[in-house]
Amino acid sequence: MQTILLQPEKGIFLDSVTSTNTVLKSEEFPHGTWIVAEEQTAGRGRRDRTWEVIGDESLIFSGKIGLENFDAGPGLSLFIGTALCKAILSVYPELTRSLKIKWPNDLYLGEKKVAGILIESEVVGASITLIIGIGINLFGKKESIPEHLTEAGFLNTNPDRAGKKNEILEKLVPALNEAILLWKDAEGRKKELILLNELLLWKGQSVRYTENGQTLTGILDGLGENGSLILKTPSGTKVDFIDSPEDFHSLN
């Protein structure tokens, strides 16, 4: 299988689906296809969590990519995160200082989660199929957020700056393709990690997390060369995480 990135002309727009990722897994859709849905009734996040779309305007997206000679490093969700940031900031440049990536797969505006990423894969030999799912809460009123979604927020709450979904989508497809190529290239990964460290939420701040039922604290030091999260413990020891620790929050 040759490397097949997202094709601009292979977009499919649907009114309602259970999950765009689930739909796109079907062999009916070739590599290069991407889907945008107006409604998602069974959205999924990492660790079997649910993803709820809220607000008056959202972007529910999944893309299907095929890669040959698969030998890329870890941290793909981070590279997709930078692609998403680039697409958003090209439309909302005023968010440059406040839009951050919460390791490993969420976008936050201030202390509120405004976007999530779910990547699913199927490996056959040296080839891999990637399903990249993205959900963004684009616009809405704060009072419309359900009480149980305590960390949820909107990219924009100003009605004068609403209606930007198509502009973001137009930037997102090529940005995702660029992210895949950077991720596959060793030198590209090194350069993108510089940007990732700049976008990293809570970098240099005190954080808490749970390990084996015990609440621990540390300073978020940054990202390792493989995209791992590096925390500095109170004793000065550095700890690497390759997956998000439980109950991971800022103490600031």
Image: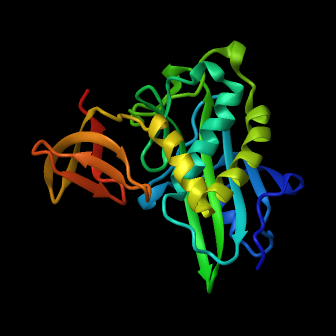
Residue 73 pos. (x, y %): 51, 66
User: Count of labels shown?
Assistant: 0
Task: Answer left or right for 252 relative to 126.
Answer: left
Residue at x 64%, y 63% (from the top left corner) = 131
209 w.r.t. 227: above or below:
above
Looking at the picture, tell me which residue is in the foreground, 10 or 193: 193
Q: Quadrant of the C terminus?
A: top left
Viewer-side residue, 181 vs 85: 181
Q: Residue furthest left?
A: 235
Closer to the camera in the image, 144 or 158 = 158
Task: Name the foreground residue: 133 vs 199.
Answer: 199
Name which residue lies at 50% across and 42% down.
Answer: 194
Task: Please determine whether, in this image, residue 222 is positioned above or below residue 161.
Answer: below
Quarter of image, res 111: top left
Q: How is the image coloured?
A: rainbow
Q: Is residue 143 above or below residue 102?
A: above
Quadrant where the N terminus sits is bottom right
Furthest toward the right, the residue is 9
> For the point 56% across and 20% down, which residue is it?
141
Residue 16: give x, y in percent of width and height.
72, 50
The picture places residue 244, in percent across and down from the top left corner, at 35, 54
Taking the image as shown, residue 52 lies to the left or right of residue 128, namely: left
* Quadrant assignment, res 133: bottom right
Is residue 32 visible in the rendered image? The answer is yes
Q: Residue furthest bottom?
A: 125
For the question of whether residue 19 can be seen, the reply is no
Residue 183: % across, % down: 60, 58
